[in-house]
Image (cartoon, rainbow, N blue to C red):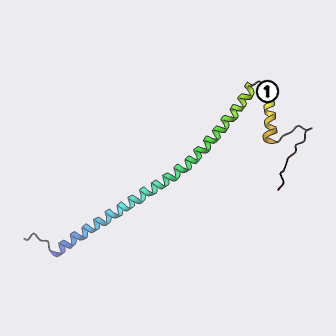
Amino acid sequence: MSLRLSSNEARRNVKHHSLISIIAGVACLIAVVYVIYSVVADSITIKEQTAEYNELVKQTEEVKERNAQINDYLNGGGNLDEYIENMARDKFDYANPDERIYYVVPGN
């Protein structure tokens, strides 16, 4: 018996080897696509959550500022009813029944 492979045996080994290479290549391609998809999806999620975090930090700072104003007003000997009245006038444009509110509209 000879150590050389017959022609059919050699073709079978080459076909088997090329099939394994193709399967391994496809598996690597699928893994690379999955990793890229995961990285992109995670970066989008991080970007959205960072924007949400920044908005929450901004809201927190606004609330702290309002609390500081209220505390300053109350610690300065102010009356809470006066504070509420001032806030109603400034933020909601409320007025007493005997008052008139005038709005200045700039001309073009």
Q: Secondary structure at mark 1?
A: loop
Question: x, y (%) of residue 83?
Answer: 78, 31
Give left or right: position of 43 versus 79: left
The mark tally for this picture is 1
Residue topped by disc 1? 79
The quadrant holding residue 59 is: top right
The quadrant holding residue 91 is: top right
Residue under the point 78% across and 36% down: 87
Question: x, y (%) of residue 25?
Answer: 33, 64
Give left or right: position of 75 versus 54: right
Category of crowding for the residue at label 1, using alpha-carbon neighbours closer than 10 angstroms: few (below 14), some (14–19), many (at least 20): few
Instruction: Depth check: give the residue in front, 58 or 3.
Output: 58
Residue under the point 35% across and 60% down: 28
Identify residue type, mark 1.
Asn
Question: x, y (%) of residue 66?
Answer: 70, 35
Residue under the point 42% across and 60% down: 33
From what the image shows, is residue 13 above or below residue 67?
below
Give left or right: position of 63 versus 99: left
From what the image shows, is residue 23 above or below residue 66?
below
Which residue is at the far right? 98
Q: Quadrant of the N terminus?
A: bottom left
